[in-house]
């Protein structure tokens, strides 16, 4: 190769450096592949239970209609104190306790949500602050009800590549704040809550196996929540209110669960007979029954708690995982498929081995000590946040306003003589 750019000589080798020593370019080497294990899980759902009968008082509906069309019996609605951040934080705390991991050890926090308090800052950054996870990167992920599985895949791949070791993936939603109470076909379906899982890297085989992610934006108008960037609202839409074409979404959901479960099993080199439990996004019992029929498996293979919580969007799968484990439906080393679908349109399925990493230690004195350290870190995080706010205020007061500094820069008009606005020369 010609050495016209001076980097390589005619043989394709780097020329010697000026001091005569041979030039050895730095070549980045990928770290060795690791495994990403689920080691912690936790949930937080609001205390307020709203039954179908409660809804009869405010919407033209009946308990019987909701039960027979969806399987939903009740859902949780957030109080004024509940938020995506607060519920996500509490679910994360429970997951850290389960895994016996300190907030300081977290490298990445991903929050899947469609109902954050702010477009930014992200809920993930706020949860990072509450946890005192000072080493963690944090971001929110927008993939509607598929968001948790998207996040799980992102976190697991970062761990498998060796880029990070410990990640929190949270799904948290306050759907009750975006419901259109004049649309009875949607407002009866949704609920609020949060679930979190902790993933940890290990050389021990197992954990997250494979995933398929998908999107078809041609169906974007079928399900959504218009927000600040909307220039003109489409007819019948309201800002910050959920709208949905139920029948179309129903058809899509049944088809895509069937397809993506098949696809992820093929990718992970598993068959349906190897699967101990499918934990789908909890939207409607009829969707799950139809998908089970399509896959030719018993409906019992699909875990469901939709009757208790309704559709909690990105939170539904981590809440379902937590409850499935608590009910004894998930045992160590079980093969699980999680599958999400929703607005976008988006879908995602992942195959994992449940609780496949050896437990750290029996929950004795050592566990109680690290539990104490976790609590101290949360208290420390609270005071650190206050101290940082005060520090910023004091620093700003001492330095003065940025405008004052701007005057010192070359070309800035001196104080008291504001620059004239350009005149129209006509
Ligand atoms: N209570 C009583 N009647 C209701 C009602 C309610 N809450 N909502 C709708 N209806 C009525 C409709 O007005 C319609 O009445 P009509 O026949 O007099 O016009 C009738 O029930 C049937 O409506 P339809 O939309 O055909 O019902 P459906 O069997 O398709 O069920 C959904 C509606 C929304 C339950 C169903 O389409 C669904 O579950 N879709 C998927 C939603 C979903 O899971 N989305 C989230 C994906 S992440």
Image: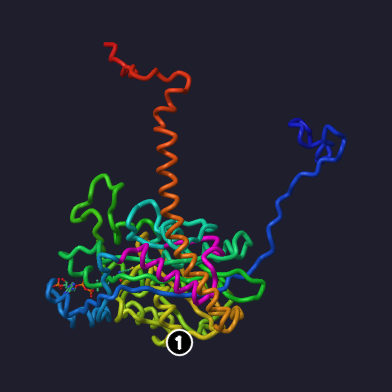
The C terminus lies in which quarter of the figure?
top left
Q: Is residue 19 above or below residue 163?
A: above
Residue 106: tell me if it is visible.
yes
Judging depth in this view, the residue of 366 and 306 nearest the camera is: 366
The location of residue 326, given as percent across then percent down, is 43, 85
Q: Quadrant of residue 194?
A: bottom left
**Residue 141 among those drawn in magenta:** no
Q: Quadrant of residue 3?
A: top right
Q: Residue at x 57, y 61 (%)?
A: 158
Residue 254: tell me if it is visible.
no
Q: Which residues are magenta?
A: 82-111
Q: Residue furthest top?
A: 426
Q: Residues within 10 Å of mark 1 (few under 14, many from 20)?
A: some
Q: How many marks?
A: 1
Q: Secondary structure at mark 1?
A: loop
For this view, does 262 lie left or right of residue 241?
Answer: right
The location of residue 123, given as percent across then percent down, is 39, 58
The location of residue 236, given as percent across then percent down, is 18, 56
Magenta stretch prevailing secondary structure: helix
Judging depth in this view, the residue of 395 and 329 nearest the camera is: 395
Judging depth in this view, the residue of 159 and 225 nearest the camera is: 159
Q: Is residue 339 above or below residue 158?
A: below
- Is the residue indicated by label 1 positioned so its CB lies within 8 Å of ligand 1? no
**Residue 93 among those drawn in magenta:** yes
Write down the residue under mark 1.
329
The location of residue 118, given as percent across then percent down, is 34, 53
The N terminus lies in which quarter of the figure?
top right
Judging depth in this view, the residue of 128 and 222 nearest the camera is: 128
Q: Residue at x 50, y 61 (%)?
A: 133
For this view, does 251 lie left or right of residue 67?
Answer: right
Q: Is residue 143 above or below residue 8?
A: below
């Amino acid at each position: 190769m010609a050495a016209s750019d001076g980097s390589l000589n005619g043989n394709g080798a780097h020329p010697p450096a000026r001091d005569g020593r041979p030039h050895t370019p730095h070549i980045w080497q990928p770290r060795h592949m690791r495994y990403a294990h689920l080691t912690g899980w936790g949930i937080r759902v609001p205390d307020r239970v709203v039954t179908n009968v409660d809804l009869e008082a405010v919407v033209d509906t009946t308990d019987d209609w909701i039960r027979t069309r969806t399987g939903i019996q009740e859902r949780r609605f957030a109080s004024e104190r509940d938020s995506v951040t607060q519920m996500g934080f509490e679910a994360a705390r429970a997951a850290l306790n389960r895994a016996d991991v300190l907030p300081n050890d977290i490298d990445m926090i991903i929050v899947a949500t469609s109902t954050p308090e702010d477009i930014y800052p992200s809920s993930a950054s706020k949860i990072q602050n509450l946890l005192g996870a000072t080493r963690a990167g944090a971001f929110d992920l927008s993939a509607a009800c598929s968001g948790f599985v998207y996040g799980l895949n992102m976190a697991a791949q970062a761990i498998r590549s060796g880029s990070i070791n410990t990640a929190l993936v949270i799904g948290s939603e306050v759907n009750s704040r975006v419901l259109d109470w004049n649309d009875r076909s949607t407002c009866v379906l949704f609920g609020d809550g949060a679930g979190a899982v902790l993933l940890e890297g290990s050389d021990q085989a197992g954990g997250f196996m494979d995933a398929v992610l998908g999107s078809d934006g041609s169906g974007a108008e079928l399900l959504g929540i218009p927000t600040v960037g909307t220039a003109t609202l489409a007819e019948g839409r309201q800002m910050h209110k959920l709208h949905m074409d139920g029948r179309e979404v129903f058809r899509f959901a049944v088809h895509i669960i069937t397809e993506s479960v098949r696809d992820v099993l093929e990718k992970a080199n598993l068959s349906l007979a190897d699967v101990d439990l499918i934990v789908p996004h909890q939207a409607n019992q009829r969707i799950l029954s139809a998908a089970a029929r399509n896959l030719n498996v018993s409906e019992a293979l699909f875990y469901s708690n939709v009757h208790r919580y309704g559709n909690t969007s990105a939170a539904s799968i981590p809440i379902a995982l937590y409850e499935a484990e608590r009910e004894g439906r998930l045992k160590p080393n079980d093969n699980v498929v999680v599958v999400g679908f929703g607005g976008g349109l988006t879908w995602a399925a992942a195959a994992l081995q449940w609780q496949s990493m050896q437990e750290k230690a029996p929950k004795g004195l050592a566990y109680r000590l690290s539990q104490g350290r976790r609590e101290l870190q949360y208290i420390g995080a609270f005071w650190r946040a206050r101290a940082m706010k005060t520090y910023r205020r004091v620093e700003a007061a001492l330095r003065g306003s940025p405008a004052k500094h701007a005057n010192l820069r070359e070309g800035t008009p001196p104080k008291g003589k504001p620059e004239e606005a350009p005149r129209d020369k006509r």
